[in-house]
């Protein structure tokens, strides 16, 4: 985003940025720039200081006060690169301040440097956190599901721009004929959700596994959800988070070789059941309560009978943010 009130400067710098391959949105003051941001989230903001209605300093204060925009790299572009402006801009946490007389090449070089340093920092943090999670044994997404003779399972996870979030999945193999799939999503964005998800999945995993072991093979997903809810409700810190959770108990009857999925969930999307026999898809929604909201929350259980060729799809809310090429978000 280029925020510049002088038409010649706006054209000059805008043209040069576009020539380098950037998609550029423009505004001529801070008020209009905030309006543009409602529909356009830029990778960086280049902003003049002296502008009518809302100057660059006021605009930067608005950016830094917004959780949605505060991490966007912000570069001041000014004709008055005096010490007072430089100090004020840096005190407001601008990433850099460039004089207009320095020219377009300097701006392009500064932007490349900012993007490179941020990517290097993101890569390093991601790597360190990933190593830390592996050392503790808390893995949010296993490499692949366990092997079962009677059903084929696959899972897919891709983080946004390499920044992990709060999605997690776990498989608890109860026997050769029974497995419990745990699919969850800790509400939040990026790093905060990812860090908290490690604590949450460790808590949920240990709780679920303890319940399953005590129940042996006579378990129901609704009862497991009720027990997990009671654990979460009693824990003040864990209970502060909002978590979507789906439990799917997949089992085979060795006598009839039939496969059943018993499921319960909280805040998750409906399970999609594809029936090969009729070649159509049925959404399966289970009425549920919030986890940890009250001690005696009720959770229902539904069953899906799988026939040869049938398929079941379970997702977290991340699927609604998936973007196909240049098309807008699907939002389903």
Image (spheres, helix red, strand yellow):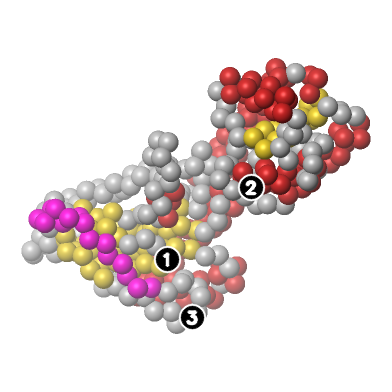
| Residue extending furthest toward the front | 7
Label 2 vs 1, first from the N-terminus = 2
Q: Nearer the viewer, residue 91 or 266?
A: 91
Among the 4 quarters of the image, the one containing residue 79: top right
Circle 1 packing at 10 Å, graded few (<14), some (14-19), many (20+), is: many
Q: Nearer the viewer, residue 185 or 269?
A: 269
Label 3 with label 1: CB-CB less than 8 Å: no
Kindly report the distance in space between the C-alpha atoms of the residues bearing marks 3 and 2.
44 Å
Kindly report the distance in space between the C-alpha atoms of the residues bearing marks 3 and 1.
17 Å
Q: Which residue is mark 1?
A: 267
Q: Nearer the viewer, residue 4 or 285?
A: 4
- Say if 230 sits above or below 52 in the image: below
Which residues are the magenta region? Answer: 274-288
- The numbered dot on residue 295 is 3
Label 3 vs 2, first from the N-terminus = 2
Q: Which residue is mark 2?
A: 35
Task: Look at the numbered disc 2 and give the secondary structure of its residue.
Answer: helix
Among the 4 quarters of the image, the one containing residue 83: top right
Q: Position of residue 99 (x, y in %)?
A: 81, 25
Q: Position of residue 175 (x, y in %)?
A: 24, 60
Q: Nearer the viewer, residue 172 or 311?
A: 311
Q: Position of residue 269 (x, y in %)?
A: 37, 60
Q: Nearer the viewer, mark 2 or mark 1?
A: 2
């Amino acid at each position: 985003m280029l925020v510049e009130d002088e038409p010649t400067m706006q054209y000059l710098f805008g043209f040069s940025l576009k020539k380098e391959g950037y998609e550029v949105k423009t505004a001529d003051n801070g008020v209009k720039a905030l309006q543009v941001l409602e529909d356009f989230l830029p990778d960086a903001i280049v902003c003049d200081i002296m502008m009518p209605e809302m100057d660059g300093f006021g605009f930067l204060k608005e950016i830094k006060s917004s959780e949605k925009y505060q991490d966007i790299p912000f570069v001041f572009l000014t004709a008055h690169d005096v010490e007072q402006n430089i100090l004020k801009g840096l005190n407001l946490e601008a990433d850099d301040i460039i004089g207009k007389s320095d020219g377009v090449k300097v701006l392009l070089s500064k932007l490349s440097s900012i993007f490179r340093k941020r990517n290097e920092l993101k890569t390093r943090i991601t790597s360190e956190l990933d190593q830390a999670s592996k050392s503790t044994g808390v893995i949010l997404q296993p490499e692949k599901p366990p092997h079962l003779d009677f059903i084929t399972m696959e899972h897919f996870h891709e983080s946004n721009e390499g920044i992990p979030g709060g999605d997690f999945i776990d498989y608890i193999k109860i026997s050769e004929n029974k497995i419990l799939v745990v699919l969850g999503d800790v509400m939040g964005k990026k790093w905060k959700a990812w860090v908290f998800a490690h604590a949450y999945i460790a808590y949920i995993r240990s709780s679920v596994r303890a319940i399953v072991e005590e129940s042996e093979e006579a378990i129901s997903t609704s009862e497991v959800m009720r027990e997990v809810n009671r654990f979460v409700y009693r824990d003040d810190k864990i209970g502060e988070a909002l978590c979507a959770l789906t439990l799917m108990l997949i089992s085979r009857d060795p006598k009839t070789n039939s496969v059943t999925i018993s499921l319960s969930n909280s805040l998750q999307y409906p399970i999609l059941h594809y029936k090969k026999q009729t070649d159509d898809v049925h959404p399966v929604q289970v009425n549920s309560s919030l986890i940890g909201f009250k001690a005696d929350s009720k959770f229902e259980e539904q069953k899906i009978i799988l026939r040869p060729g049938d398929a079941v799809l379970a997702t977290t809310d991340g699927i609604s943010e998936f973007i196909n090429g240049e098309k807008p978000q699907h939002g389903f």
